[in-house]
Image (cartoon, grey):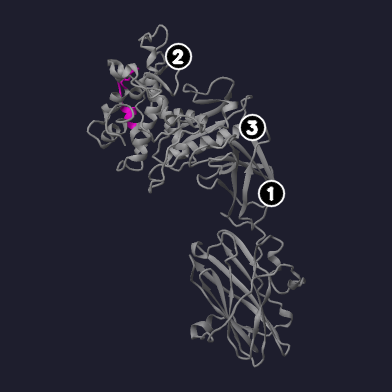
């Protein structure tokens, strides 16, 4: 017996008085097993509550529930064999479902067969999980001697437990026409809703050459569109609903009509553990790219419109959608370690013709068009936004002048040590920098690697790894493996010996971005006992720190942690990455 969603027009044709012949359907239902069962007993209470049109009584039926299947217990009260047909109408919070009328099987004189009406093929229907289920089965019998009859039997269940079963006694009725036909819902009941779900379609330009947990290949990926603004319009009236934070589904009042949906690259509150934030992607004209879907016909029986794929028309809008989806992904991965977003946060994504950067004064991430479909740039700059929600650039003492002309020192170190230092007013992952730059860039890169790698807790049996996404296969291991030992200043860029700073008093004030990222990975991926909110708790310590300068950020961060488990873990993570000591 096949279940179908019921439209306004088909629901009225469930009684056997319909003029069309249900046997003309080209769809074949699954075979329904017939089992013998003892006759159900009729107690005094049962008889008093039974629907009994009066003699002659030809058959009776009772409806039950086993797992997700309806069980029709039929009792032939005659001395003639015959054939039983039935259809079912099942209503619940998710909508109205129905089966076509079909033959269940034959029965012998005086026999009490049991028929199973399976519902396992109904997508999304789990009776045990439903708050309530109202099931009605229209049964019709035809005896070999020509007599006919039938009626409707029903039950009401809550979370899969039958609350109100009843038995009905049927008298013969010509042509199978019933007086008590099932209800037709031609109006929407108050409080009923339907959902429409959305998915982003994105793709990366190249295959990641190493073992990475998220988005390794260059193929297309379909991601739930978390928290996006969905503007639904019916009969000229529109409303905005934000899709939920797991499946990307938006729920609307179930108003029958022709619906259209406009989705834009703006969203808010898609992680459930933050009170308020919003991100938007704007094109060069300053507008939020949008995509219209539909129109869709919504009826009183519509419960869901399925997963709609959002691909922007072409060109820049498609690239902005990629940036937007990667921003959502980065934030969700970061939120797995605590509520790392400050309430009332905002973030704007835009293109730039220059270098990728985050502008804290306007809370804007700027990404070059040519970099927007790579794995690293968006997540790195979004990492800056997350981190600097807890402190400003000024408070952390960022300074890009290390080893620049006119700076201090003036870069008179021996050039033969093979180590790289910042050129004029910039920074780089392989360079020695003031601690303020190494720290800020290192934690932004930590959000980048967290976005694409599982932590130890997510892969507890040794499956965790940490790869800096985007490095070519032939790159040196220290450039892509963030599980490797750091200590750039100790080993030098070529592994040929110490950098000049390693043995000088300036050592405590300078660092390397990679080494800081590796320390953060060890702190949040390898440490145990710091709790699920460990990253959020760490950021609160950074927020509480004072006296920031261009150097000695390790000491500045430790100050508010004194005597805590976080301080001990921080020291263990830094050892072997930022300074000498026992490594992880």
**Residue 415 within the segment the image draws in magenta:** no
Name the residue at 53% across, 48% down.
247
Q: CA distance from mark 1 to mark 2?
A: 58 Å
The answer to whether residue 409 is above or below residue 557 is: above
Quickly name the residue at label 2.
423
- Image quarter hosting the C terminus: top left
Q: CA distance from mark 2 to mark 3?
A: 35 Å
What secondary structure is marked by label 1? strand
* Residue 162, image x, y percentages: 49, 71
Counting residues from the start of the chain, the first of labels 1 and 2 encountered is 1
Q: Nearer the viewer, residue 95 or 400?
A: 400
Quickly name the residue at label 3.
317
* Residue 55, image x, y percentages: 64, 89
Identify the mark at residue 296; answer none if there is no mark: 1
Alpha-carbon neighbours of circle 3 within 10 Å: few (<14), some, or many (≥20)?
many
Magenta segment, which residues? 540-552
Tell me the quarter of the picture where residue 114 sits.
bottom right
């Amino acid at each position: 017996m096949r279940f179908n969603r019921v439209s306004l027009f088909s629901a009225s044709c469930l009684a056997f008085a319909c003029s069309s012949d249900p046997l003309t359907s080209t769809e074949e239902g699954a075979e329904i097993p017939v089992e013998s069962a003892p006759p159900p007993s009729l107690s005094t209470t049962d008889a008093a509550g039974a629907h009994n049109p009066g003699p002659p009584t030809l058959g009776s039926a009772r409806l039950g529930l086993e797992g997700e299947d309806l069980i029709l217990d039929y009792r032939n009260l005659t001395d003639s064999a015959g054939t039983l047909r039935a259809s079912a109408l099942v209503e619940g919070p998710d909508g109205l479902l129905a089966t076509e009328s079909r033959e269940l099987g034959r029965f012998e004189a005086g026999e009490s067969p049991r028929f199973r009406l399976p519902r396992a093929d109904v997508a999304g229907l789990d009776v045990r999980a439903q708050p309530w289920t109202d099931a009605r089965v229209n049964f019709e019998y035809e005896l070999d001697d020509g007599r006919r009859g039938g009626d409707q039997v029903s039950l009401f269940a809550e979370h899969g437990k039958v609350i109100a079963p009843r038995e009905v006694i049927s008298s013969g009725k010509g042509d199978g026409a019933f007086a008590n036909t099932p209800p037709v819902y031609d109006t929407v009941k108050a409080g009923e809703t339907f959902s429409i779900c959305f998915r982003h379609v994105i793709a990366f330009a190249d295959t990641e050459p190493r073992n990475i947990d998220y988005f390794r290949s260059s193929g297309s990926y379909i991601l739930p569109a978390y928290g996006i603004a969905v503007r639904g319009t019916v009969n000229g009236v529109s409303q905005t609903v934000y899709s939920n934070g797991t499946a990307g589904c938006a729920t609307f009042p179930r108003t029958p009509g022709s619906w259209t949906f406009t989705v834009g690259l703006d969203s808010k509150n898609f992680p459930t553990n933050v009170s308020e934030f919003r991100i938007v992607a704007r094109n060069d004209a300053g507008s939020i790219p949008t995509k219209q879907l539909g129109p869709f016909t919504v009826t009183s029986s519509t419960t869901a419109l399925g997963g709609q794929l959002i691909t922007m028309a072409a060109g820049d809008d498609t690239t902005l959608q990629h940036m937007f989806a990667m921003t959502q992904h980065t934030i969700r991965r970061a939120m797995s370690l605590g509520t790392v977003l400050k309430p009332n946060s905002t973030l704007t994504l835009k293109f730039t013709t220059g270098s990728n950067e985050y502008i804290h004064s306007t809370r804007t991430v700027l990404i070059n068009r040519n970099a927007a479909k790579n794995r690293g740039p968006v997540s790195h700059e979004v990492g800056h936004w997350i981190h600097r929600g807890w402190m400003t650039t000024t408070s952390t003492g960022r300074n890009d002048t290390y080893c620049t002309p006119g700076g201090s020192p003036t870069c008179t170190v021996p050039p033969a040590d093979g180590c790289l230092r910042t050129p004029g007013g910039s920074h780089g992952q392989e360079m020695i920098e003031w601690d303020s730059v190494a720290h800020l860039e290192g934690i932004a890169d930590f959000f980048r690697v967290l976005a694409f790698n599982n932590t130890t807790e997510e892969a507890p049996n040794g499956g965790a790894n940490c790869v800096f996404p985007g490095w070519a296969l032939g790159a040196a291991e220290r450039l892509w493996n963030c599980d490797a030992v750091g200590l750039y200043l100790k080993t030098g860029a070529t592994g040929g010996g110490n950098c000049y700073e390693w043995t000088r008093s300036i050592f405590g004030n300078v660092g390397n971005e990679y080494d800081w990222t590796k320390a953060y990975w060890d702190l949040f991926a390898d440490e145990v006992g710091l709790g699920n909110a460990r990253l959020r708790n760490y950021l609160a310590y950074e927020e509480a720190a004072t006296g920031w300068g261009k150097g000695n950020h390790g000491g500045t961060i430790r100050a508010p942690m004194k005597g805590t488990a976080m301080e001990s873990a921080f020291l263990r993570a830094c050892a072997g990455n930022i300074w000498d000591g026992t490594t992880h």
